[in-house]
Image (cartoon, grey):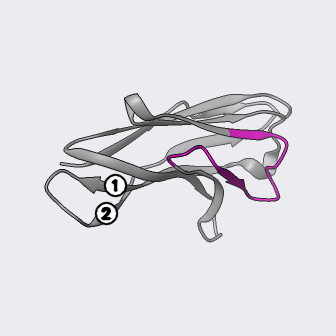
């Protein structure tokens, strides 16, 4: 059973930092891209940052210069370091991975359940 589990969310004051983690587990042969998406109340889910298996990254304009995505391929884990947080960063943050499971030639899209990030004084 393929599973993504996020951790690291919480309440932080404006200007503060948080580090999110997402670990993938299950019958995994290979993970292509991994990414973080976020959904604020009443809004659509949007991309925050994504990283390929080779380490290439892409960020939403709203987080460039403040967020850094990284991954540990040996541990099937992706991280999101969030600095200079703003109230508008408040959202549920979801991890997403494009995974090839053992014995399959297909790529499966897997999502975590999300972790709440609240930026407020």
Q: Is residue 93 something that shows in the picture?
A: yes
Q: Residue furthest left?
A: 103
Q: Secondary structure at mark 2?
A: strand
Q: Is residue 112 something that shows in the picture?
A: no
Q: Earlier in the sequence, mark 2 or mark 1?
A: 1
Residue drawn at x 60%, y 36% as measured from the top left: 70
x and y, in percent, of residue 1 in the image: 17, 48
75 displayed left or right of 36:
left
Graded by Cα atoms within 10 Å as few (under 14), some (14 to 19) or many (20 or more), the crowding at tag 2 reads some
Name the residue beneath numbered marker 1: 99
Relative to 118, is 107 above or below?
Answer: below
Magenta stretch contains residue 63: yes
* Magenta-colored segment: predominant secondary structure: loop
**Res. 16 mark:** none
Magenta stretch contains residue 17: no
53 displayed left or right of 112:
right
x and y, in percent, of residue 16 in the image: 80, 28
Q: In front: 41, or 86?
A: 86
Graded by Cα atoms within 10 Å as few (under 14), some (14 to 19) or many (20 or more), the crowding at tag 1 reads many
Report the Cα–Cα distance between label 2 and label 1.
Answer: 5 Å
**Res. 108 mark:** 2
Q: Secondary structure at mark 1?
A: strand
Q: Are marks 2 and 1 in contact (CB under 8 Å)?
A: yes
Magenta stretch bounds: 53-68
x and y, in percent, of residue 13 in the image: 79, 30
């Amino acid at each position: 059973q393929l599973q993504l589990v996020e951790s690291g969310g919480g309440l932080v004051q404006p200007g503060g930092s948080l580090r999110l983690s997402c670990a993938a587990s299950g019958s995994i042969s290979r993970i292509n891209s991994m990414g973080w998406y976020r959904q604020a109340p009443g809004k659509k889910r949007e991309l925050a940052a994504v990283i390929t298996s080779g380490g290439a990254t892409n960020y939403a304009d709203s987080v460039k210069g403040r967020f850094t995505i990284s991954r540990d391929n040996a541990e099937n884990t992706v991280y999101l370091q969030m600095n200079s947080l703003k109230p508008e960063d408040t959202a549920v943050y979801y991890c997403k991975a494009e995974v090839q499971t053992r014995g399959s030639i297909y790529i499966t899209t897997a999502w975590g359940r999300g972790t709440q990030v609240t930026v407020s004084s």
